[in-house]
Image: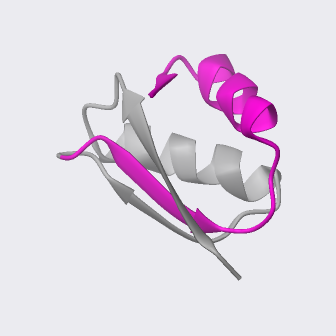
């Protein structure tokens, strides 16, 4: 299974990281790792990119390219 890395702006603390992790897990992502300092999320799973963007946006953050 491939690991996907996305960059997210707006995360500032561990609460933000937990919120982002839960959003990704709700989409079916596994082995989710959030790095607030780098503004990154890494996960395994086949998830549509637009679904990820929408789930992250719904939590108040933005996926950046």
- Please tell me in which quadrant of the rendered image residue 13 appears: top left
**Relative image position of residue 34 (x, y in whole percent):** 39, 57
Total numbered circles: 0
**Image point (72%, 63%), residue name:** 29
Left or right for 27, reference 30: right
Q: Nearer the viewer, residue 64 or 26?
A: 64
Asked whether residue 46 is drawn in magenta, I would say yes
Is the residue 37 above or below the residue 56 in the image? below
**Image point (82%, 44%), residue name:** 48
**Relative image position of residue 56 (x, y in whole percent):** 61, 30
User: Which residue ends up furthest to the bottom in the rendered image?
Assistant: 1
**Image point (68%, 19%), residue name:** 58
Left or right for 56, reference 34: right
User: Which residue ends up furthest to the left in the rendered image?
Assistant: 37
The quadrant of the picture occupied by the C terminus is top left
Q: Look at the image and give the residue range highlighted in magenta.
A: 38-65
**Relative image position of residue 54 (x, y in whole percent):** 73, 23
Is the residue 49 above or below the residue 58 in the image? below
Asked whether residue 26 is drawn in magenta, I would say no
Q: Nearer the viewer, residue 19 or 10?
A: 10
How was the colour assigned to the protein in this rendering? one colour
**Image point (45%, 52%), residue name:** 41
**Relative image position of residue 55 (x, y in whole percent):** 72, 31
Left or right for 13, reference 52: left
The quadrant of the picture occupied by the N terminus is bottom right
């Amino acid at each position: 299974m491939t690991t996907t890395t996305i960059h997210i702006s707006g995360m500032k603390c561990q609460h933000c990281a937990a919120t982002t992790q839960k959003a990704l897990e709700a989409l079916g992502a596994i082995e989710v790792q959030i790095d607030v300092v780098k503004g990154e999320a890494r996960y395994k799973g086949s998830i549509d990119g637009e679904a990820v963007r929408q789930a992250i946006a719904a939590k108040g953050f933005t996926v950046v390219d």
